[in-house]
Amino acid sequence: MTISISFRGKTYTVDTPLSSPLSVLTEQLEALTGVPQSNQKLVWKGRKTTSSDSTLEEAGLTQGTKIMLMGTTANELDALKSTEAQVQRRDAIMARRAAIGPSKVRSTGSSSTEQQQFRFHRIEPLPHLPKPEEALNILTKLANDPAVKHVMALHKFSVGVLTELAPHEHPNLLGLNVNGGEAIKLRIRTDSYDGFRLYSEIRRVSLHELTHNVWGPHDDKFKTLNSELNREVAQFEAAAREGAHPLNGGGSMYEPTAAAHSHSHVGGMTGGTNVLGGGSSPISLEERRARAVQAAMQRFKEQEQELEDRCAT
């Protein structure tokens, strides 16, 4: 009997007698895919049993049956163990720092208490998917993104777990908010599993899901808050590019530093843009920021409808 096995976008063909036990099939699959027998999960239409001692015929397999294989390879397990060890070491360091007590630092934004309270409290990549260490890095980058931390402190958002959506489990979804912030799940991978989506897209989805901490349905109240979060991120980054910093987590900004001003002086003109035919038209700092924010918001509006269609919060 010929059986087709699908695993992470690839199809494998196996020929084996109907009287063979399932263990023979799983042994062949281990040789083909690198997934140990103990980690294999086989799914097919008409499944009757999960016992490895049952024959293929007893399990409901017939000629041409298509099977989906799910599982983690031995190499991925080793990488996951290494990642877990790194997380444990980091947690141990943080525990030692907490035991010593807070250090005195100069505050340039929201208080350390707010940063500890209003944040993603735990980060969990899916261990059964490829490259869990790279997934951990992406989720960690998002949790530590200054603009994201800014809006979370500003709106007092607290999320229990930041994790990912498996492409095969939720092929049509980009994001999911569970119970108003208990967990936020993001589609960070491409359909090939070992590839990752653009960070800017992942962050945009995260702001959408953070909005669901307050509003459930995609109504006008949701759209208003979602636009506000994206605008605040754009304003934060526009100010950061000009050398300004948020003041106490609010919307006001410090004026740019002298270093930032020095880069705007060209030929004795400050903050100007060239005009065809010579001369310049001065553009203020606030105007530059406003234009950057306006461009970001236009991109946001064009992309938001797709996101609403692919959100199952």
Image (cartoon, rainbow, N blue to C red):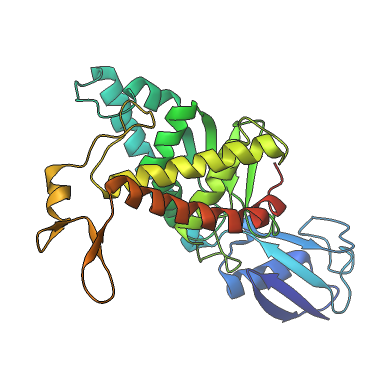
Q: Quadrant of the N terminus?
A: bottom right
189 left or right, relative to 42: left
The residue lying at 55 percent from left, 60 percent from top is 189
* Residue 287 locus on image (x, y percent): 34, 49
37 left or right, relative to 201: right
* Residue 188 locus on image (x, y percent): 54, 56
284 left or right, relative to 304: left
Judging depth in this view, the residue of 280 and 120 nearest the camera is 280
Q: Is residue 155 visible from the viewing direction of this image? A: yes
Q: Quick check: 226 above or below 37?
A: above
Judging depth in this view, the residue of 12 and 284 nearest the camera is 284
Q: Which image quadrant is residue 18 in? A: bottom right
* Residue 163 locus on image (x, y percent): 54, 44
The residue lying at 34 percent from left, 31 percent from top is 252
Judging depth in this view, the residue of 110 and 302 nearest the camera is 302
Q: Quick check: 222 above or below 247?
A: below
Q: How many marks?
A: 0
Q: Quadrant of the C terminus?
A: top right
Judging depth in this view, the residue of 231 and 187 nearest the camera is 231
Q: Quick check: 283 above or below 97?
A: below
Name the outermost residue toward the left: 268
Q: Is residue 144 visible from the viewing direction of this image? A: no
* Residue 115 locus on image (x, y percent): 38, 27
The residue lying at 49 percent from left, 50 percent from top is 203
